Image (cartoon, coloured by chain):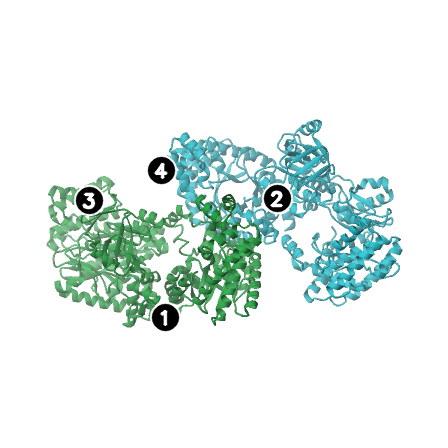
Chain colours: A cyan, B green
Amino acid sequence: MPAGLSDSKEVLGGKGAGLAKMSQIGLPVPPGFTITTAACNAYAAGGAFPAGLEAETRSSVLALGKAMGKGFGDAHDPLLVSVRSGARASMPGMMDTVLNLGLNETTVAGLAAASGDERFAWDSYRRFVFMYSDVVLGITDEECPFEAIFHKHKKRLKVKLDTEVGAADLKKVVQECLALVKKATGKAFPTDPWEQLWGAIAAVFRSWGNDRAVTYRRMHGYPDDWGTAVNVQAMVFGNLGEQSGTGVAFTRNPSTGDKAFYGEYLRNAQGEDVVAGTRTPHPIEDLKTDWPRIYKELDQVRKTLENNFHDMQDLEFTIENGKLFILQTRNGKRTGLAAVRIATDLVKEKRLGKEQALLQIEPDGITQLLSPVFRGSEKDKAVKAGRRLAKGLNAGPGAATGRIVFTAEAAVAWAAKGEQVILTRQETSPDDIRGMQASEGILTQHGGMTSHAALVARQMGKVCVAGCGELEIHPSKKVLHAGKKTLREGDWLSIDGTTGEVIEGKVETRRSDLLRVISGQAKPSKTGDDARFRQLMKWADAVRVLRVRANADQPDQAKIAVALGAEGIGLCRTEHMFFGEDKLPAMQRMILAENPADRRKALRTILPLQRRDFEGLFKAMGSRPVTIRTLDPPLHEFLPHTDKDIQELSKAIDMPAQAIRARVEALHESNPMLGFRGCRLTGLVPEILEVQVTAVFEAAANVHKKGVKVQPEIMIPLVGHHAELRSHVEVVHRIAKEVMAKKQVKFSYLVGTMIEVPRAALTADEIAEVAEFFSFGTNDLTQTTLAVSRDDAGSFLPSYIDRGIYERDPFATIDRGGVGKLMRTTVELARATRPEIKLGICGEHGGDPSSIEFCHQLGLAYVSCSPYRIPVARLAAAQAALRY
Amino acid sequence: MPAGLSDSKEVLGGKGAGLAKMSQIGLPVPPGFTITTAACNAYAAGGAFPAGLEAETRSSVLALGKAMGKGFGDAHDPLLVSVRSGARASMPGMMDTVLNLGLNETTVAGLAAASGDERFAWDSYRRFVFMYSDVVLGITDEECPFEAIFHKHKKRLKVKLDTEVGAADLKKVVQECLALVKKATGKAFPTDPWEQLWGAIAAVFRSWGNDRAVTYRRMHGYPDDWGTAVNVQAMVFGNLGEQSGTGVAFTRNPSTGDKAFYGEYLRNAQGEDVVAGTRTPHPIEDLKTDWPRIYKELDQVRKTLENNFHDMQDLEFTIENGKLFILQTRNGKRTGLAAVRIATDLVKEKRLGKEQALLQIEPDGITQLLSPVFRGSEKDKAVKAGRRLAKGLNAGPGAATGRIVFTAEAAVAWAAKGEQVILTRQETSPDDIRGMQASEGILTQHGGMTSHAALVARQMGKVCVAGCGELEIHPSKKVLHAGKKTLREGDWLSIDGTTGEVIEGKVETRRSDLLRVISGQAKPSKTGDDARFRQLMKWADAVRVLRVRANADQPDQAKIAVALGAEGIGLCRTEHMFFGEDKLPAMQRMILAENPADRRKALRTILPLQRRDFEGLFKAMGSRPVTIRTLDPPLHEFLPHTDKDIQELSKAIDMPAQAIRARVEALHESNPMLGFRGCRLTGLVPEILEVQVTAVFEAAANVHKKGVKVQPEIMIPLVGHHAELRSHVEVVHRIAKEVMAKKQVKFSYLVGTMIEVPRAALTADEIAEVAEFFSFGTNDLTQTTLAVSRDDAGSFLPSYIDRGIYERDPFATIDRGGVGKLMRTTVELARATRPEIKLGICGEHGGDPSSIEFCHQLGLAYVSCSPYRIPVARLAAAQAALRY
């Protein structure tokens, strides 16, 4: 992207800059001009237009009229304009827009005459009055029920559609509405086009400060002083008859990334008709035969755009009486798969550098390449068996199978119970976002490739089949009709987001091809997605500074993590190792033992089993570092709680049920999260620590003897005070010494701690005297810093995010303002004591791109995340390194 | 106290400094010298004596011999020395002492010759061997059962008392023991006096690091690097016959504060005989007739000491062959009552300035003046009814009634269940401290006024009857015999620590006289304790900077708080107001309501009741500020949980039990402490906030109209993010405006928040934009910062304090290293945004002297504590102001 352009976004807003650039590179943009963001800020500060704004605007409008061959307020061929907001970044639907500005009793007649379509003219006037009254005059629906008035007339005329109302009746509607405005406001609706224009510009300025916009900015972290620009543009109309039309298009396929023009159009329609999903648009390919001249022009536009914007573009166009106008262009949203393909293709086409390519991909999207596909020929079999119900648009690629739910609430509730669900809606709206997130896939009856469901699903990396008109979906009745078949809530359904097919029943899914290659189940290709993926990761690895580790406890997890690029294990949770069938009874005996000797005896039976587990892990990880956390959860988690289970255990270990129950009760806690666990437990019951550490070092010694340069790192959880850690560190060193002496080997190891208690963060200087490394346990650190229990947050935290109190879920993305401050303090204090201290993160935030960026800024050594998030982390780390 | 003396304590330890000063002011101190604390620290660091120590010590010992006219190791008239520890502050019984050092086969004969008492010489040698083997050689009782050997000989001789064993048999005992030492250690017991001395000095140095001493330091917050001094002093003997003796005394009565010599002595005895309680000593008054010369000398010493130390002294003396020696002096421990009397008397006597007087009183002790006494003639009736079991020493004044327990563990356990207990022991030891803390009172069979039980009880302000020899206490059998009566664990018992009486059964207690005066139940006196108390508080108020408020919800609490000096209410917990019989059903209906309208309806019935409560509070507090916290606890606390209670509620409010149970289950939380409560709740159910705030402002308006300048302060709990607070503040301002308009009054009020969530502390700058005041909720702030649930901490926190991880219970005394850091950050950030912000504390720490000192250092405006702690807080605030 040439220098200066991002600047122009700051001044002209994203939309204004795009229009300016398109105009520069000779694309057919409706003439217009942009009032800068500086003017908005001046208006906000002074409550009035800055000096000179009116005069400049006036001359710009006159120039516009000249360019269009029309006159603003001209009685015969009036210039109409749109007045739109446009901030530095896209804030869809947050701010105000006024269309068709310049109409009044006189100009409407001129428009009718010039267009030869009186109905069109009066309908435009009606739309303008409705919009202006709402946006500029701030008239509420209660004060002036415009839609109700319109509806009343349609009822009188016994028609259903707006288009069935003729010019004469539209005139009646408009006049009735204008009278109402006068009554409600005490002032006549402005008829002077200039007065209309000043009002609209002021309204756009003001809309920067409306609640929706402020909330949106808070959510996205956009500063208030950006301000919005105002784009004033000559109106062009796609609804002037069959020589007019409108459409939206992507310069490449946003689902697959294919280098092919992709989009939809409608003749005799306005933009909103395409997006709203009320009329089903035609694929852009149809233009080739339907309207070859326009297709050729558009295809040229497509190339010009990509050459100049260096990215796949999402554009809006209108054809007015045979003349093509490009209304808007912006970088197009795409699936993860498409993102990888487009970015690598653009580099190959030399349209983009490698680093720019890395920055172009939403890291979260990559997970899509690892998401499941249908297993073997399962789907084919299902189709042959007649289970294919319908085919819709392949709006979000991938395979999903789950049980039908009809509302977002149900999706969330069922998913919370561990069910896989397919959210099935007529069409989706922003209210459905949480439900979409909770679902395996989304299926809609209405809407196209650019409908809400399709856009959001692609962004989320969700499987989606949209606009499946063969189905009838009745959310209120909780049924779905597919021809003669009826499916109900809870029935199994499968959708193929790559083909758009909808299949009755469950179709087993399997690993994606990329994952098959990565896990050695399939051979690598030279040009396929796996090759592109390798290419991209290579570029990312070359620039990133952060190392990436995996959270893994089992050798098979460790192997896939290494295949996905893990450079070590950042968190091995050893408690999982106690839950095995072969180990749990011994663990239970240990907990129920009445003295240290019995405890040790019970633990001794676990030792060889744990040692074997660790050997597997060390072998899988080779010479990479492996961080092993000692026991963290409270003891009661290992004991049965129901009478039946207690009875069974009683028999199994020959101990009275009464005694077991008493112990279970004694271990009960009011707030287990803040209770007797982690180092508090191993500090008082050191036998557990001893057996775990012995197992680690014996395993390390055994594997080391086979020539593997093991790097164990023992991590003590829940430390809040350096003295807690100190006693643990002593035990670790003692056992390490004993084992190495006994096994006659020597290898290096580290002892460190989690930072997950605020007090540990606040006293990191003291703790760093004892710890050789820190790993931020941001899950617990978030719980304690915010005093929010993750298990209980469901009753209020979602509303906090909706209300913009927290911009994002603090359990998904590090709360930089709170938890982040503590992390920064920790880093500073720790380095003051021990400059070479190794710092990492192993909370779930370690796989979140924004949090990874923050970790890069803090200068951590590594992030650790679940194996399947590793590619995301590698890319996010690279982006952070490129940005900061 | 003259300058330089406190320095000398740092170098010489308390005991050494006392000896040096006594020597300076001409008191008869046995000659000696002190090895400095610096030498101890050097020994601890290097594991060996610092250079020069041996040579200096050697020349000091030689000088000592010269002063005493004896020779160290001299065969004819040997110099014996004591080697004692002495830290900066008294740590009774925590460290080691060796007496009679310098004895061996040769010098024992010299001692026999010089004293003319062979038995005395050999008994001294026996004591030395026993003590040295234990303290210096570290020989355990299992290795060398000295006492058993001695006992065996007494059995053989058919005698009971040590004193009945003659010189020849003592010699046998000694020789048998010396042989055993050689066998056990493989080395002969050292016979060279110098070798003995080096061993003893090293042992004292080492004892600074023993477990007991470390624990004691942690409990009292003494730093490890103080080190201990070593006092080497010529031995003097009180057991050289009837012209010898020993005793301990206080210059004033430590129980009552009376200006009268107070103490105990024994003829022909050593110090340990007085303290151990094995022989019952005589009151010091008896000396007047028994040995008038010595009494006169002692009385002169008493005056000299008070004139020079400006405080009541606790002294030890020995008379050797008619010559008086003062072995030790230190500021005497005293009851709270005595502390107040002594301090005010010393000021009156012009021995002390007011400010020094304030610094002389342990703030916690004052609560004793407010602690209960027996109700009316209840005790007299009990005595008349023959329920008086015995009379012991009035070691800790006050009245206590409770159920008998025989061990410290039982005391802790029973108290945890809410039982009042009387800890009943033969004698107490440092192991019993926690049990003593948990008890209403302490009763011992053995020991005098200066026994462990007596000293510690007075320090704690606990009621104590000591040395009640009429009782037979059998802890192992859990019975107590009083003549023919037998009492068992759990039986009720009452003790009068002011008279020493022990009463069978429960005797109701009542308010103390001071509290009766304060609460208007009795008339003030001119010279009584209430007058002294007022005097002292006046002095305190004159110097303190911190304001003191009360945590109170009820008008009667508020009244007593004001009488005790409260300058406002710092925390009114409104949830208590929902628990009243007249309000709970409405609250429950509100919680169970299914929509905001029903919720409002239920809450409307609470409004007038809450308003009435607040009116009472405002009236009681007059023009003082009243901080009212809006609802804090989670809703489930208001609902029944047992089936029976649910059934009852179901009937009462005519709602199916099933529905109630479902709601109770829905409200269940894994970690309620971190759950849906405080502003999270009132943010989502604003009706609760609205009714509470309306009740506050309507009440304030009504009371204001009656001419009282009310100052309500609305406090929002559990805020973690400024946006949470913002929405609450808007509601408060809206309602305040409405109510003032409706009631046609105007008064000022504040809106602020608790700081109890780490995130709030970290973002105090943002929160201060919205809050007019902060009140540290250090209970919750400690829970979240340490990630420790107070309810669950019992399983590990006591061991943390025992192990010295936390020096003191962080829920009693602010953890300055962790929570304190957050508080400091908060103060700095808050003032940066709003320099005039009002800052206070309302956690339980607000009544803890050390925490109050910290609040003073932070520059808070006020502390708030329970009404009965207010005098403590006033005094502690004054001390803080004098110290910093």
Give me the C-alpha separation between circle 2 and circle 1.
Answer: 65 Å
Are the residues under badges 2 and 1 in a single subunit? no
Give me the C-alpha separation between circle 1 and circle 4.
Answer: 57 Å
Q: Position of residue B535 (x, y in %)?
A: 33, 70
Q: Position of residue A772 (x, y in %)?
A: 48, 46
Find disc 1 in the rendering and name its residue.
Answer: B538
Please tell me whether mark 2 or mark 1 is closer to you in this view.
2
The circle drawn on residue A409 is 2
Please tell me whether mark 4 or mark 3 is closer to you in this view.
4
User: Label 2 is placed on what type of residue?
Assistant: Glu
The circle drawn on residue A595 is 4
Q: Nearer the viewer, residue B155 or A401?
A: A401
Badge 2 element: helix
Badge 1 element: helix
Give me the C-alpha separation between circle 3 and circle 2.
Answer: 79 Å
The circle drawn on residue B147 is 3
Label 2 lies in what chain?
A: A
Badge 3 element: helix
